[in-house]
Amino acid sequence: MNKTLLSTALVVVIAATAFAPTAQAANTGTITISGKVLSDTCTVAVNGGATVALPTVMTASLGTVGATAGTTPFTVALTGCDTNTTTAAMSFSGSNIDAGTGNLKNTVVGGSNVQIQLLNGASLINASSGANAPVINVTSGSGSVAMNARYVAASAAATAGLVASTVNFTLSYQ
């Protein structure tokens, strides 16, 4: 009798769990996608098309490691951009970038012991890591950013000599 009662109770429990509501995973969802297609790129002018010419400075102004001199403003201007463009982020590349400092190396053989720093306004740009690289706001197809370049005593006091460098940049449009 106990076995029959136990068997009946077990059948009732199993049947009750079979009809109990179970959790159901959602089997539908939505993926929302948006984007923007821009036509061509902007026309870029650095310093109105001229070389950024740093002033002549005396070695005494660069007498200690890290000393800076000759800060010179210049602009990077964009025109003719697609009117849907809102920003252009700048990144730098090239073999003249010092990976340790992010400064530009002096490419003149036998030149003075200086490098060139780029600044976004007053913020030092690390051309190697991209830290403080400009993002140019673009409105109605044009925009610009004010930058600066200056000498910096690299690993010792500056010596007399010529200074030159170049750096490539790429703009990523949004």
Image: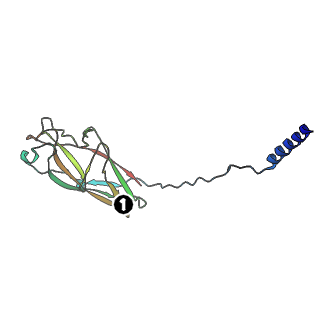
User: Picture coordinates of residue 63 (x, y %)?
Assistant: 9, 44
Residue drawn at the location 21% of the way across and 47% of the way down: 117
Residue at the farthest right position: 1
Q: How many numbered marks have been drawn onto this rendered protein structure? A: 1
Residue 11: which quarter of the image? top right
Residue at the farthest top position: 109
| In the image, residue 138 above or below residue 161 | below
Q: Residues within 10 Å of mark 1 (few under 14, many from 20)?
A: many
User: Picture coordinates of residue 74 (x, y %)?
Assistant: 22, 55
| In the image, residue 165 above or below residue 28 | above
Is 139 on the left or on the right of 153, as rendered? right
Is 156 on the left or on the right of 129, as rendered? left
Is 95 on the left or on the right of 33, as rendered? left
User: Picture coordinates of residue 96 (x, y %)?
Assistant: 24, 39
Report the quarter where the C terminus lies. Answer: bottom left
Report the quarter where the N terminus lies. Answer: top right
Residue drawn at the location 90% of the way across and 39% of the way down: 2
- Which of 22 and 106 lies nearest the eye of the viewer? 22
Residue at the farthest bottom position: 140
- Which of 35 and 116 lies nearest the eye of the viewer? 116
- Assign a secondary structure to mark 1: loop
What amino acid is found at the position of numbered circle 1 in the picture?
A: Val
Coloration of the structure image: rainbow
User: Picture coordinates of residue 172 (x, y %)?
Assistant: 38, 50
Residue on which disc 1 sits: 138
